[in-house]
Amino acid sequence: MPQMTDERVRAGMNREEDLSLLNEVSMKTAGVSHLEMCIQCGTCGGSCPVAMDMEHTPRMLFAMLRAGMRDEVLRSNTPWLCVSCYHCVVRCPQEVHIADVMYTLKGMAIHAKLYTNATAPHFSQTFVDMVEAYGRSYEMGLATRHYLRHFPLRLPGMMPMGFGMITKGRMAVMPKRIKQMDQLTAILDRAKQLELNS
Ligand code: SF4
Ligand code: SF4
């Protein structure tokens, strides 16, 4: 996937500066994002194991936020490729909470229906469904549902790996619900209620 060139980012930044999008993202991010502190040093992209496949490095994405490029940011594949490894967060000199901002952008892209490749959002939704049902991830169900939905022809090829993980005790065949699931359900219901009211 080609990355957006610095020239195109600069073209966006030549627009009159509009900090409303940056402020909106910062407000929606849990805790204090420090997003406005970004100095465009590029350490994040240089630390990121998946930057090569991102349409925009985190640094570029934050420059686009500062330029108010809402559609371009929310269409970017960058937040969806972020694997939350936190390498960038540890190395950022400004303590920008980059991974948390990526979560915020994913949510905004889903609400705005701007990210057109549904594969990653569906995977996230399936993960959430598993957590709501069992209180934890259920890898076997997650992988099976995802491949049946998006890559059914690849499913047979995945079976040897799945079998190997099961026999080595790395993956359970059946889901196991956590204890006191009712408490987690109450927390999740409250969080949904707060989101609706926000
Ligand atoms: S490492 Fe931090 S300060 Fe540097 S570009 Fe990335 S977010 Fe901005
Ligand atoms: S947290 Fe996301 S953006 Fe940061 S280095 Fe890891 S994959 Fe890249």
Image (cartoon, rainbow, N blue to C red):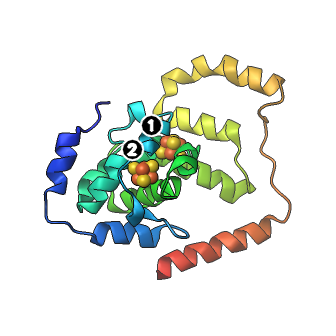
Q: Is residue 27 left or right of residue 123?
A: left
Picture disc at residue 46:
1
Q: Quadrant of the N terminus?
A: top left
Camera-nearest residue between 33 and 196? 33
Whole-percent x, y for residue 82 in the image = 49, 43
SS at mark 1 in the image: helix
Instruction: Name the residue beneath numbered marker 2.
Output: 42
Q: Hey, what amino acid is under mark 1?
A: Gly
Residue 123 makes an appearance in the image: no
Spatial CA span between label 1 and label 2:
6 Å
Q: Is residue 6 left or right of residue 191?
A: left
Q: Residues within 10 Å of mark 1 (few under 14, many from 20)?
A: some
Please tell me whether residue 154 is drawn above or below residue 182 in the rendered image.
above
Q: Residue at x 36, y 71 (%)?
A: 24
- Please state which amino acid type lies under the numbered disc 2: Gly
Front residue of 74 and 92: 92
Crowd rating for badge 2 (residues with CA inside 10 Å; few <14, some 14–19, many 20+): some
Please say if 175 is above or below 24.
above
Could you say whether the residue bearing mark 2 is in a helix, strand or loop?
A: loop
Q: Is residue 59 above or below residue 16?
A: above
| Residue plotted at (25% across, 39% down) | 4
Report if residue 166 is visible in the image: yes
User: Cβ of disc 2 within 8 Å of ligand 1?
Assistant: yes
- Please name the residue shown 38% across and 47% down the image: 41
Q: Position of residue 38 (x, y in %)?
A: 39, 58
The residue lying at 83 percent from left, 29 percent from top is: 169
User: Residue 52, image x and y in percent?
Assistant: 40, 30
Q: Are marks 1 and 2 in contact (CB under 8 Å)?
A: yes
Whole-percent x, y for residue 152 in the image: 51, 27
Question: Residue 177: which disc?
Answer: none
